[in-house]
Amino acid sequence: MPPSSTNKIIGYSSSKLAIMISKFQVLNVRIGRFARLSVFAIATASLVVGCTAPPTRGPVYRSSGSAPSSYSSSIASFSAVSWQALPGWQEDDLSQAWPAWLKSCDVLRKRNSEINWRQVCAQASNISARDSQAIRQYFENNFQAYEIRNSSGSETGLVTGYYEPVMSGSKTRTSVYNTPLYAYPSEWKKSRPNPGPTRAELMNSGILKGSEIAWIQDPVEAASMQIQGSGKIRLEDGKILQLGFAGTNEQPFKSFAQWLLDRKEITNKEATMQGISQWAKRNPDRVNEMLNANPRFVFFKETSGTLGALGVPLTAERSIAVDLKAMPLGSPVFLATTKPLSNQALQKLVMAQDTGKAIVGGVRADYYWGSGESAGEFAGRMKQNGKMWVLLPR
């Protein structure tokens, strides 16, 4: 569902970050991939249940100044901590996160802001992209780390994963590639229905005829791409067609995995995209019935990259989606969690460059694994506990 603007100011004890969070909500909600839900959100958690504002002026952070010791809001509280409190901070190769931070800076430095992004982004130009220790010193000198807690006071929250599907396809229908992906209907651009027809109604109405943007082989893969909100199509000549989110039919998301669980067609362990694909292969005549359980339908457009809500290309394993009520979009965040189905530590500096309808809460992140089958395997199995620290300019 395309996001709607909001002018609501979140109630912080110190107004600076509140103003910025509200402002980022208004300025960025038009851009992102709001149709995307995390893989876990469709495979487990959500399965089991699916105009800019005028700038507000306020105090400005300066790199030479002192940072406030705490913030609080309706969904989170932030407390200043030392760098030693971040597990794995010294071990992380920050040169791998640096390109993602520079992408955030490309956007943040252009905006009027009560948080002094311009100064820290200007200083970033003096840092060697290959020198992890220099990058670490840059963050320690110019930023304050804040531990994030949920409104309940808990310091841990859910970390899920998402990815960008890559599949073979064609720009024209063939005997092999006969499942269409659609562009936003041209007639809806002038008068957008709210809500529009459900998926089942769209499939039976002929409204979408002529709006085909590409063709792939598997209808379940098409549904997966709709859930992720973007994807790559490898064409028969070897070229890559990049597709991004273009809009929806304004219907609510309902989990077709939950539909299968309710009918005892799959087990909880099988409630992943991989498990659903296996069910579809065993039940080809019921695939449309399953997919129609979700009335929501996502449309695509050609793009030049996998863009998050910040409007910059996402970086595999260094970008996350967050709740915009918890922190400004574009912020550096240190994430401490574990890899899927293991106790192996995953402790990294990442950038809050995306958001999504299923990403709700203070300590809540959707970790971007990248593109392709391997990324999809990790994303589909990721349901971890984690902790988060947001880094804000001093």
Image: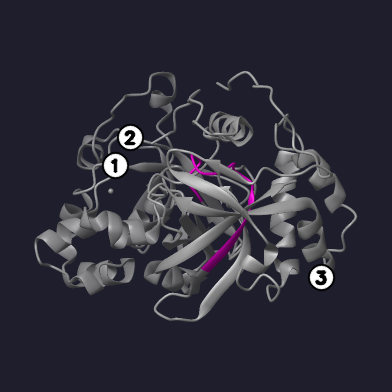
Residue 249's mark?
A: 2
Which residue sits at x=90%, y=55%? 126
Residue 296's mark?
A: 1
Disc 2 packing (10 Å; few <14; some 14–19; many ≥20): many
Residue 127's mark?
A: none
Which three-letter amino acid code belongs to the residue tagged 3? Gln
Camera sees residue 355: no
Camera sees residue 35: yes
Q: Position of residue 290 (x, y in %)?
A: 18, 56
The reply to whether the C-beta atoms of the residues labelled 2 and 3 are less than 8 Å apart is no
Which residue sits at x=23%, y=59%? 257
Q: Nearer the viewer, residue 309 or 8?
A: 8
Tag 1, which secondary structure?
Answer: loop
Q: Nearer the viewer, residue 53 or 234?
A: 53
| Main SS category, magenta section | loop
Which residue sits at x=71%, y=50%? 103
| Discs 2/3, front | 3
Tag 3, which secondary structure?
Answer: helix
Does 77 appear in magenta?
A: no
Which three-letter amino acid code belongs to the residue tagged 2? Asn
Q: Position of residue 85 (x, y in %)?
A: 62, 66
Position of 63 with respect to 213 (left or right) is right
- The alpha-carbon separation of the residues under discs 2 and 3 comes to 48 Å
- Specify which label sits upstream in the sequence, 1 or 2: 2
Disc 1 packing (10 Å; few <14; some 14–19; many ≥20): many
